[in-house]
Image: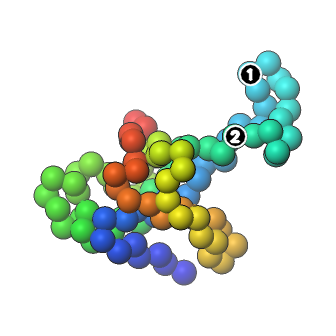
């Protein structure tokens, strides 16, 4: 199934956080913090049609987004987050 975000929305898929600390301590799932890094899955038409915005972000970019941003959805067993372009803070290169 394909997701096509409307307007200035972006669909992202979270990148799983590390389960071990640097010192080797394994963290249980309840102690892990929600990751704020994700991969862009789809981009809305308003972003793609805007000359200034279309070069800022591409599908498959790794991004960092605001902590409480977006709406989480589950489709075909996969979890995605739909958020506005303004909620994306940076692209990881």
Quadrant containing the N terminus is bottom right
Q: Badge 1, how many Cα within 10 Å: few under 14, some, many 20+? A: few
Residue 76 position (above or below residue 46): below
User: Going 44% across and 60% down the picture, which residue do you hit?
Assistant: 83
User: Going 66% across and 45% down the picture, which residue do you hit?
Assistant: 34
User: Residue reaching furthest bottom?
Assistant: 1
The residue that label 2 is drawn on is: 33
The answer to whether 22 appears left or right of 4 in the picture is: right
Q: Secondary structure at mark 2?
A: loop
Q: Nearer the viewer, residue 21 or 67?
A: 67
The answer to whether 30 appears left or right of 9 in the picture is: right
The answer to whether 9 appears left or right of 35 in the picture is: left
User: Residue reaching furthest front?
Assistant: 68
Measuring from the top left, give residue 79's x and y in whole percent: 63, 65
Residue 41 visible, this angle: no
User: Going 39% across and 42% down the picture, which residue do you hit?
Assistant: 89
User: Going 85% across and 32% down the picture, which residue do you hit?
Assistant: 26
Residue 84 image-quadrant placement: bottom left
Measuring from the top left, give residue 15's x and y in whole percent: 60, 48
Number of numbered tags placed on the structure image: 2
Q: CA distance from mark 1 to mark 2?
A: 15 Å
Q: Secondary structure at mark 1?
A: loop
Measuring from the top left, give residue 28's x and y in whole percent: 86, 41
Give the mark, 1 or 2, whose residue is nearer the N terminus: 1
Label 1 vs label 2, nearer the camera: 2
Residue 92 visible, this angle: yes
Residue 60 position (above or below residue 92): below
Residue 18 image-quadrant placement: top right
The residue that label 1 is drawn on is: 22
């Amino acid at each position: 199934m394909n997701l096509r975000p409307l307007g200035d929305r972006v669909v992202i898929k979270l990148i799983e956080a590390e389960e071990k600390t640097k010192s080797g301590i394994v963290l249980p799932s309840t102690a892990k913090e929600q990751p704020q890094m994700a991969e862009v899955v789809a981009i809305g038409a308003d972003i793609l049609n805007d000359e200034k915005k279309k070069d800022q972000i591409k599908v498959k970019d790794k991004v960092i987004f605001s902590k409480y941003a977006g709406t989480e959805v589950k489709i075909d067993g996969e979890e995605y987050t739909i958020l506005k372009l303004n909620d994306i803070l940076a692209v990881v290169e």
